[in-house]
Amino acid sequence: MDLRLTALTPTASLDALRASKPAVAGPQGGGAREGFSDAFKSALHNVSALQKNSNELQDQVQLGNPNVSLEQTMLAMQKSQIGFQTALHVRNRMVQAYTDIMNMQV
């Protein structure tokens, strides 16, 4: 991981600060680094998709669709529950880390 620190002077302009930040490519960047916020957003979108899929399968089972099995629906519900619990634990850890950092004495 490349960590570059630049000295900030009182006369540094906003453009100079923006230029000194390393560029991080997104998912279409061809295998470059992905930032934590991008990974977290992607994980949240995946959890949302799992919950949506679970809800759609539940609706189809309730409507009596013969192409959707109860086992498939229960598996989708468990996947969405595990994904949600994981996201919740990550969020709780992030909040705890933030409060720990804010309570540090400088």
Image (cartoon, rainbow, N blue to C red):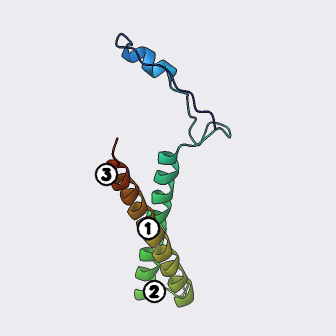
The quadrant of the image that shows the C terminus is: top left
Q: List the residue tagged with mark 2.
A: 61
Determine the secondary structure under disc 2.
Answer: helix
Query: Neighbour class for label 3 at 10 Å: few (<14), some, many (≥20)?
Result: few
**Hey, what amino acid is under mark 2?**
Val
Q: Earlier in the sequence, mark 2 or mark 3?
A: 2
* 28 or 82, nearer to the observer: 82
Q: Is residue 27 above or below residue 99?
A: above
The residue identified by callout 3 is: 103
Residue that appears at 49% across and 19% down: 19
The numbered disc on residue 8 is none
> Do residues under tags 2 and 1 come within 8 Å of each other at their CB atoms?
no
Between circles 3 and 1, the one closer to the viewer is 3
Question: What secondary structure is found at the residue carrying circle 1?
Answer: helix
Residue 85: % across, % down = 44, 72
Q: Position of residue 23 (x, y in %)?
A: 55, 29
On screen, residue 55 above or below 28:
below
